[in-house]
Image (cartoon, grey):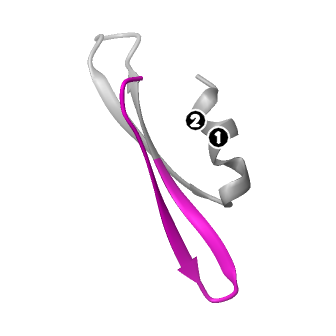
Amino acid sequence: MAKKSVASLQTGSKRLSKAIKMVKSPKTGAYIFVESIMPPEKVNEWLSKK
């Protein structure tokens, strides 16, 4: 997990963040990018779990 990126999105009255993390695939060993849109409070929790 060498790279992480967080972008802020604002839609209507809700404030959301899009987080992208790089994860190593257990099958091939190649890296893949996993994206998720969530509230800003949950970004650090999502990035820290595997």
Asked if residue 31 lies in the magenta stretch, the reply is: no
Point 68% across, 61% down: residue:
39
Q: Quadrant of the N terminus?
A: top left
In the visual, does 36 lie left or right of 1? right
Up the image or down, 28 lies above or below 1; here it is: above
Q: CA distance from mark 1 to mark 2?
A: 5 Å
Identify the element where label 2 is drawn. helix
**Residue 11 picture location, percent across and down:** 57, 83
Residue 47 has which mark? Answer: 2
Residue range highlighted in magenta:
1-19
**Residue 30 picture location, percent across and down:** 26, 18
For mark 1, what is the residue? 44
Up the image or down, 34 lies above or below 2; here it is: below
Circles 1 and 2, Cβ within 8 Å, touching? The answer is: yes
Identify the element where label 1 is drawn. helix
Point 37% across, 18% down: residue:
25
